[in-house]
Amino acid sequence: MPKVKQISAWIEDRPGVLGEVAAALGAKKVDIRAFMASAMDGKGFVRLVVDTPVVARKIFAAHGWKTTVDDLVEVVIPDRPGALGRVADKLGAAGINIHYGYVGTSGRARTVSLFLAVEKPAAALRALRR
């Protein structure tokens, strides 16, 4: 269960911009492991977990997209009902709040990676190892 770096960036909220982000990362062989995107206040906002965060940040900077980097907790869980609940219960019992999280599955996966933004990543990792 590692800590991972998440890159968050404000981008334009217009058709095609998510494709531009993905294409720019792909052109430099940056693998997107997970992402979530939304629009807020007329601007686009994307959060990504990638295999090479340093390279990705350079790409974002070259395009004028401002970024922040945060530590997340990556938890590999079985793709079965109740798996998320067990993780959330452990963190709650340890007094750790989950700010947000994201995961996806094809429905045929045996496991999925759950990415969680928590207030204390190191304490969360300890709680989840129990």
Image (cartoon, rainbow, N blue to C red):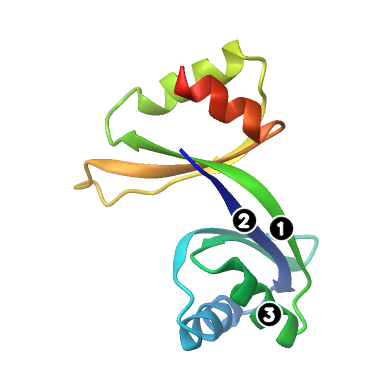
Give the position of the N terminus as an image quadrant: top left
- Would you identify the image quadrant in which residue 16 lies? bottom right
Pointer 2 residue: 6
Residue 102 in the image: above or below residue 92: below
Pointer 3 residue: 58
Marks 3 & 1, CB-CB < 8 Å contact: no
Q: Residue at x 67, y 73 (%)?
A: 57
> Of the numbered discs in the image, which one, if any, rests on residue 21?
none
Which mark sits nearer the N-terminus, 2 or 1?
Answer: 2
Residue 114 in the image: above or below residue 8: above
Tell me the kind of residue under disc 1.
Answer: Val
Which mark sits nearer the N-terminus, 3 or 2?
Answer: 2
Q: Pick whichever, 60 or 4, lies toward us.
A: 4
Pointer 1 residue: 69
Residue 107 percent location from the top left of the image: 24, 46
Q: Residue at x 53, y 80 (%)?
A: 25
Q: Is residue 2 left or right of residue 14?
A: left
Label 2: how many residues lie within 10 Å, few (<14), some (14-19) or many (20+)?
many
Residue 115 percent location from the top left of the image: 51, 44
Tell me the kind of residue under disc 3.
Answer: Lys
Element carrying mark 1: strand
